[in-house]
Image (tube, rainbow, N blue to C red):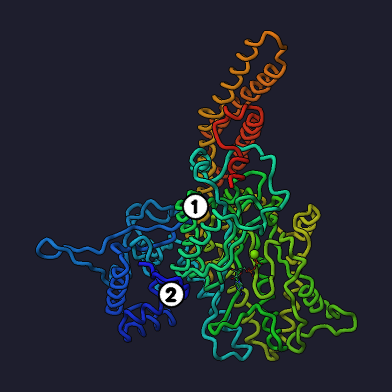
Amino acid sequence: MEPKTTDLTQLFGSMVFNEDAMRQYLSSNSFAAWKACVENHTALDLSIANDIADAMKHWAVERGATHYTHWFQPMTGYTAEKHDSFITPAPGGKVLLEFSGKELVRGEPDASSFPSGGLRATFEARGYTAWDPTSFAFLRDNTLYIPTVFCSYSGQVLDKKTPLLRSMEEVSRQAVRILRLFGDTETSRVIPQVGPEQEYFLIDEKDFAKRMDLRLCGRTLFGAPAPKGQELEDHYFGAIRPRVAAYMQDLDRELWKLGVLSKTKHNEVAPCQHEMAPIYTDANTACDHNQLTMDVMKKVARKHGLVCLLHEKPFAGINGSGKHDNWSLATDSGDNLFKPGKTPSQNARFLLFLAAFVKGVDEYQDFLRCTVAFAGNDHRLGAQEAPPAVVSIFLGDELTAVVESIIHGTEYADPGKRALRVGVDVMPPIPQDNTDRNRTSPMAFTGNKFEFRMLGSSQSIAGPNIALNTIMAEELEQFADELEGADDFNGALAELIRRVFTQHQRIIFNGNGYEDAWLQEAARRGLANLTSTADALPAYTAEKNVALFTRHGVFTREEMAARQEIHMENYCHVLSIEANTMLDMLRRDILPAASAYAGALNRRALGHTSSSCRYENATAARVSDRTDALLAVCDKLEEDLKAAPGEAEARMTYFHGVVLEDMTAARTLADQLETLVERTFWPFPSYSDILFYM
Ligand code: ADP
Ligand code: MG
């Protein structure tokens, strides 16, 4: 039951069994036990779990719940749920509503069909889900949702949440070691903070229903450019139209009820494209909330007769959708470790964390690239609208000047100033750098956080954040090992920072990432340019990457091999579905339409006795040329699909090379036909119908 109030403070979190609700519904004893379990990351006692389950059930049933589900994040990148009702038979043909601690803590979905990359032998095909007590349960559609992790019986990880939680532990442990060196005796945890900006398209459901490609693939596989695109930039930050405004209002309310801190909304560059950004939270909650946000976005759209497209590239020639993963580290008292400080010591700390980040991104650039490598994102990265496929870090002019002064021991900024001495001097104020406005950098420092901009709009943010956390843990561990043994801390610190910036300078780039000159420069610097999923994914299990994740206990070697295989298979599945959808639309819609039109033109020409019928004859000939060519491409695509090899990497390479090329050829011809065939003959809504419906 939604509170009948316009008071947002009441509405917010009203569907969440949050700390407040727990305090109200739990005995003070159980509440304290839960709190201790979350703070110290210890296991819950079964008697406490029983109490919490009972309280959760009461809270949920009072609000109309009939079912509960363990909600988990398998390797598909989506969320999964299996609903059980609370009812248990009672004497006299009645039922009781029951929910025990055992059911709260552990569930056993019959989940053998989720991709596991060969990790689960058939005899132990079932995995189990286990409650993540650090993430609040919530209520949706009369079901109590319990956020859980998902593992196999032999303990192998089958989901995205478990490694995320592990990586958060690791980076916390190492960051606290560093803080101790700076005399911080208070901080007991350091928590990655994440704010993901989510882009999406909204289109009319009538158009969606008429296009099989949108329905099955989430993107258009065909479509000639509309006469008008985004060139006037009249949509970007433009006034939000009433229909969309109503949607956004509804979306905000739904998200607020679920405790999602939805904060900003605006129109994006492309027509029909919009963005929503939440206020940042810890990485685990941010990941849960982003999954929830994507789901709620789609559901709310249907209520407004709209469809929300989360695909990275729904329309060719129009900007695609990404997700900016804003990431920083904060202490448990809320002190942001990426905030340039006001004292020499705070600055030294900032520079040390910055150095760790720069070193880590340089050393693991290939892995970071892998975390955003999938079929949908291949349409964006490296194109002129999204970051290039080369990973680099934007620091802005001021901070770069500081880094250079440290490297060279020379003066920074205004001539006449001394070199900045780490731990002795105060840094100049670091403004949010305006030179970054063109947004071409894949990883930008934006004042007190890094903005990782290579993510695709549809993807789970878990993978990139697992990587960022683990990479930081590794670098901070190396730094702590070195500095803990130093006799002169300040001297060793200054030396370390200078050395690291010197060795990893190549990853810093403040210029325009869209220019070819940058790609040439990046090659000279030895930076990886992995232009597609097929190019990137082999690096996933490079020995240094396996060493990183196994050393920190985030993945085992087998889990990494399994994940790589799942990503490769997923790429081939997506392309195979797209290719088959294309074939279906070509053979059953496009070719028949073109043929019918050519036939009509020929009949019209025959019917005319008084004119030379140049238009009819010439157009019919052009249409026939294309349909002949298109038929040949269809046959080739069909044959090539059959000939795909079975082994995962070879198959991926084959789909990327052979199948994708056929698909491109088919699309080119079909789009030419669309511009030739009379409007009433064309079987689907065009780009101008879809994008300019408002
Ligand atoms: P932009 O210019 O990219 O739109 P915003 O200031 O709107 O930047 O912030 C974008 C996102 O960054 C928001 O989700 C915000 O909550 C998040 N964010 C802000 N500060 C931090 C931080 N310290 N750590 C992580 N995320 C942050
Ligand atoms: Mg941003």
Left/right placement of residue 374 relative to residue 502 reads left
Residue wearing tag 2: 10
Q: How far, Cα to Cα, is label 1 from label 2?
A: 43 Å
- Residue 463: image quadrant is bottom right
- Which amino acid type is marked by label 1? Ile
Extreme residue in the left direction? 92
Measuring from the top left, give residue 634's x and y in whole percent.
57, 29
Q: Is residue 329 above or below residue 325?
A: below
- Circle 2 sits in a helix, a strand or a loop, which is it? helix
Q: Earlier in the sequence, mark 1 or mark 2?
A: 2
Q: Residue 566's mark? A: 1
- Residue 471: image quadrant is bottom right
**In this view of the protein, which residue sits in the foreground, 265 or 569?**
265
Query: Which residue is at a point 71% across and 62% down the rendered structure image?
Result: 441
Q: Which marked residue is nearer to the observer: mark 1 or mark 2?
A: 2
Query: Which residue is at a point 74% across and 75% down the rendered structure image?
Result: 431
Q: Residue 357's mark? A: none
